[in-house]
């Protein structure tokens, strides 16, 4: 007869995030000893880690924090939405974010190499993934600074942690700056611009868009005299779709994001947007 109850199984699942059958097997092997069962789950998980190396990690979460004008955002991935909403996985993401904030790391390689309790963060992530029974990876990190930085996290499903995250920084401080920064961060989450300003768009991409616009206009039989104006109009349309400051503001499409910021008396300095798996 088993030396544990359904409540013991539930408690161990909450502590480890492991599946029910894995928890029951570990408790059986540990004769009901919860601490020993956790050790068994961890060891078995680490043995299976190499088998999980090639697995897809399309689920997960985005987490962010702003401290003294510095915004940090991370994306941590796992294999299934079941694990993505597990307390153990969310706690791991919180730990990774705390390390990122405290260390000042600005790139993934630096972040993963940071010592956490005597071992690199990368090893901590693998070990926690072993307990969860899935491949877990820290996919990316963003770090931006500004007079005012807003962090906005958006849930695409009420049952899951945030899947979309945005950091947006502006020059300037005060209530107007904070309101404008937040409104634009929400806009970025929804509209997904690829560039902050026109100056950030690679010159070769602009030339490619210009060439495509010209060839398309010619194929449509547009008059030669009107080509230049048509091409410029279509390139402007490209900017309106790809560049944040040129986009129509989500809350008031009669204004561009650039105009909204200008009216608030602030200037955009940096933006970062993560969507899990994209």
Image (cartoon, rainbow, N blue to C red):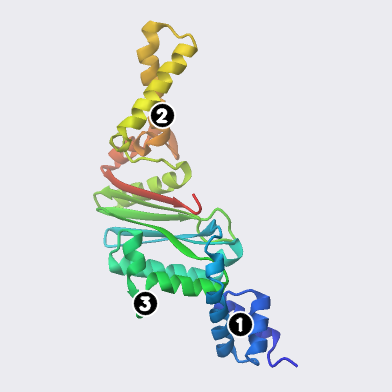
Q: Nearer the viewer, mark 3 or mark 1?
A: 3
Alpha-carbon distance for marks 2 and 1?
54 Å
Relative image position of residue 11 (x, y in whole percent): 61, 82
Nearest the camera: 132 or 176? 132
Relative image position of residue 237 (x, y in whole percent): 41, 26
**Which residue lies most toward the right here?**
1
Q: Relative to 198, is 273 above or below?
A: below
**60 sits to left or right of 102:** right
Alpha-carbon distance for marks 3 and 1?
28 Å
Q: Nearer the viewer, mark 3 or mark 2?
A: 3
Q: Earlier in the sequence, mark 2 or mark 1?
A: 1
Residue count near mark 2 (Cα–Cα under 10 Å), binned few <14, some 14–19, many ≥20: some
Residue count near mark 3 (Cα–Cα under 10 Å), binned few <14, some 14–19, many ≥20: few
Nearest the camera: 36 or 228? 36
Q: Quadrant of residue 249?
A: top left
Residue count near mark 1 (Cα–Cα under 10 Å), binned few <14, some 14–19, many ≥20: some
**Residue 91 visible (yes or no):** yes
Residue, disc 2: 238
Q: Earlier in the sequence, mark 3 or mark 1?
A: 1
Q: Are marks 3 and 2 in contact (CB under 8 Å)?
A: no
Q: Residue at x 30, y 59 (%)?
A: 106
Which numbered circle lies on residue 119? 3
Q: Are marks 3 and 1 in contact (CB under 8 Å)?
A: no
Relative image position of residue 39 (x, y in whole percent): 54, 85
Q: Residue at x 45, y 15 (%)?
A: 217
Residue, disc 1: 11
SS under mark 2: helix
SS under mark 1: helix
């Amino acid at each position: 007869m088993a030396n544990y109850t359904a409540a013991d199984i539930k408690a161990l699942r909450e502590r480890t995030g492991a599946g029910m059958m894995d928890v029951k097997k570990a408790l059986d092997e540990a004769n009901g000893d919860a601490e020993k069962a956790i050790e068994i789950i961890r060891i078995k998980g680490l043995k299976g880690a190499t088998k999980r190396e090639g697995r897809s990690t399309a689920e997960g979460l985005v987490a962010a924090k702003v401290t003294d004008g510095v915004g940090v955002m991370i994306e941590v991935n796992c294999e299934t939405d079941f694990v993505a909403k597990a307390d153990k996985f969310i706690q791991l993401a919180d730990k990774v974010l705390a390390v990122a904030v405290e260390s000042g790391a600005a790139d993934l390689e630096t972040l993963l190499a940071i010592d956490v309790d005597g071992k690199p963060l990368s090893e901590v992530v693998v070990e926690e993934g072993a307990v969860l029974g899935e491949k877990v990876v820290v996919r990316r990190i963003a770090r931006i600074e500004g007079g005012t930085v807003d962090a906005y996290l958006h849930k695409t499903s009420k049952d899951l942690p945030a899947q979309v995250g945005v950091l947006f920084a502006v020059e300037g401080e005060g209530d107007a700056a904070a309101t404008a920064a937040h409104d634009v961060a929400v806009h970025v989450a929804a509209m997904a611009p690829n560039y902050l300003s026109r100056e950030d768009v690679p010159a070769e991409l602009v030339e490619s868009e210009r060439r495509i616009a010209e060839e398309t206009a010619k194929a449509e039989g547009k008059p030669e005299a009107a080509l230049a104006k048509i091409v410029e109009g279509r390139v402007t349309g490209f900017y309106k779709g790809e560049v944040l400051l040129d986009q129509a503001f989500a809350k008031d499409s009669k204004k561009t994001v650039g105009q909204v910021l200008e009216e608030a008396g602030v200037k955009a300095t940096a933006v970062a947007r993560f969507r899990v798996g994209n």
